[in-house]
Amino acid sequence: MSQLHTVNKSPLDRTALESAVKHATKGSAILMIEDGIYGAMKGTIKSSLVTDAIGDISFYVLGPDLKARGISENQIIDGIKVVDYNGFVDLVAEHDASQSWL
Amino acid sequence: MSAVKKFLYVNRKAPYGTIYALESLEVVLIGAAFEQDVALAFLDDGVYQLTKGQETADIGMKNFSPTYKALGDYDVNKIYVEKESLDARGLTLDDLLPLTYEDEDDDWAEKDSIKVVTAGELAEIMDQSDVVLSF
Amino acid sequence: MKFSVLISEGPYTHEASDTAYNFTKAALEKGHECFRVFFYHDGVNNGTRLATPPQDDRNIVNRWSELSKAHNLDLVLCVAAAQRRGIADADEAKRNGKDADNIAEGFRISGLGQLIEAGIQSDRLVTFGD
């Protein structure tokens, strides 16, 4: 099965992203939403959580939440795809189940 | 009649500081009546929900930890506790409530409901679940 | 897909209700079917008609009521969580000896079984929380 994992908190605030990456199997996807979008940024002490796992896991970030926080797409890690709410809906439909890391 | 689905209840938070531990248990108990394939996962600070010796009189809250012991009677007997989360917190299985169930397929023999699993094993369990409820 | 949504936090304090609303709206506009939106924990606070948020920002409660009307959604507040937090419809208020009810239009109060049923009957269940 291929799950979609959502993370909504910054990796410098909570362990949700770290835990999600640790438990996402190869071929699954992680979507960063709300304050979770900070996990998509380059150059933080937690960026490697994503860069080490990219390839095995597909990473996405919710564009509207990036914009709200004034983070531009060129500040995010290469290989993370930006999606809008339509893309979020598609991700849910395309994966077998959805798991939120709260 | 719909097919039986694999429900996984994921618990990552400590008890009492927030209500999630208690209210998630309430979902599990109500959900038990629906005869689905139910499993519980305790990882990260969620492992603290199962520690023995909880005494809440001094904080003035109800001690709901005895309710975990009733899970076996509700046919909820797949309780996965993550090893790495226990290790990180200096805990072992001995620190946890002894949760058991009676196996009707084995002459009602009393068995342990808690299965300590690695992160990798838990990842597989999560992957195979149809409905994942996180609290 | 036939989807359901679980909202575990109240309005404004967390972004959960906003994200859930935006997700649900997008999914409906794409032609997907929403089986149920279930509100649990502080999420039941999304269902009070007594909220008076500032006029220059979104009205979370009304938005849900309107979406519910436009798409015939089933917005369910968990009865146990609602009782704990003081959200009641007329029947609940009467049953519990309260002098008022406060449920917003488009919402109904029911048991946790509705959440489990949503998980069983839907293709996907998405949770929005803390």
Image (cartoon, rainbow, N blue to C red):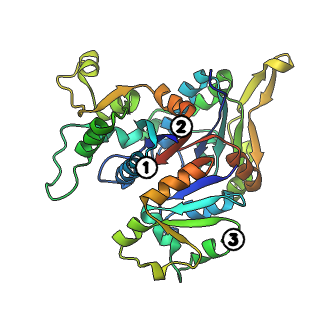
Q: CA distance from mark 3 to mark 2?
A: 47 Å
Q: In this view of the protein, can residue C124 be seen by the observer?
A: yes
Residue A9 percent coordinates (x, y): 47, 62
Q: Share a chain, discs 3 and 2? A: no
Q: CA distance from mark 1 to mark 3?
A: 29 Å
Residue B51 percent coordinates (x, y): 63, 42
Kindly identify which chain the residue marked by label 2 belongs to: B
Q: Secondary structure at mark 3?
A: loop
State which mark lies toward you, 3 or 2. Answer: 3
Q: Nearer the viewer, residue C63 or B85?
A: C63
As drawn, the residue found furthest toward the right would be B106
Kindly identify which chain the residue marked by label 3 belongs to: A
Amino acid at dot 2:
Glu
Name the residue rendered at 45%, 78% in the picture. Answer: A73
Amino acid at dot 1:
Lys
User: What residue is disc 3 on?
Assistant: A55
Q: Nearer the viewer, residue A24 or A45?
A: A24
User: What residue is disc 2 on?
Assistant: B55
Q: Secondary structure at mark 2?
A: loop
Q: Horizontal placement of B59 versus C105: left or right?
A: right
Q: Horizontal placement of B38 versus C75: left or right?
A: right
Mark 3, other Cα within 10 Å: few <14 / some 14–19 / many ≥20:
few
Q: Horizontal placement of A101 versus C96: left or right?
A: right
Mark 2, other Cα within 10 Å: few <14 / some 14–19 / many ≥20:
few
User: What residue is disc 1 on?
Assistant: C30
State which mark lies toward you, 1 or 2. Answer: 1
